[in-house]
Amino acid sequence: MAGFEVNYRALEECGSVAAAQTGVFGGIGDGFTPGACDASIFGRLDASEAVAKATGGVETAAAGQFAPAESLLGGIARAVEAVSASLRGAEDAATPTRATSA
């Protein structure tokens, strides 16, 4: 495509990183189980129970984010691959073919 240069290596690297991170977030989510936090780990503070309850809330909220992150990253990896394939197709279509002599 005249006047238009595509860095396919950068696209491939971006897609590869997104695909790799998809597995990372999936693995974390599979192994992450939020649980009740024992207030005693915060010592004998008046607020220990409240801090433990808040910590449990953060764990629960985090647990709900791993699957969406995995899904979004997978979508990014697929989208980058689709963009790369579309650009290659457009580039191939724009490149004149040469007739070969027999």
Image: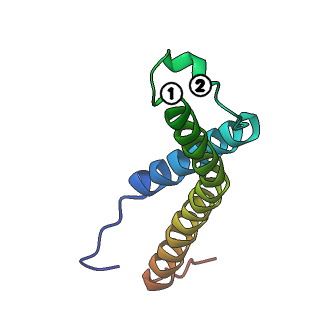
Provide the secondary structure element on which disc 1 rests. helix
Image location of residue 56, percent across then percent down: 61, 39
Residue 61's spot in the image, x, y percent?
Answer: 59, 51
Q: Is residue 75 above or below residue 28?
A: below
Q: Residue at x 46, y 48 (%)?
A: 13
Q: Residues within 10 Å of mark 1 (few under 14, many from 20)?
A: some
* Residue 29 placement: quadrant: top right
Q: Position of residue 15 (x, y in %)?
A: 52, 54
Label at residue 28: none
Earlier in the chain: of badge 2 and badge 1, it is 2
Residue 85 image-quadrant placement = bottom right
Circle 2: residue type: Ala
Q: Return the residue nearer the eye: 62 or 75.
A: 62
The answer to whether residue 3 is left or right of residue 24 is left
Vertical placement of 92 versus 84: above or below? below
Q: Residue at x 53, y 51 (%)?
A: 18
Real-space Cα distance between discs 2 and 1? 5 Å
Mark 2 Cα-neighbour bin, 10 Å: few <14, some 14–19, many ≥20: some
Q: Which residue: 53% across, 77% down?
A: 86
User: Is label 2 in contact with label 1 (beta carbons under 8 Å)?
Assistant: yes
Relative placement, left or right, of 69 versus 46 is right
Q: Which residue is mark 1?
A: 48
Instruction: Give the amino acid type for the residue marked by disc 1 in the picture.
Output: Ser
Task: Residue 39: give its label.
Answer: 2
Quadrant in the picture for the N terminus = bottom left
72 in relation to 64, above or below: below
User: Dot 2: what SS?
Assistant: helix
Q: Quadrant of the C terminus?
A: bottom right
Nearer the observer, 67 or 93: 67
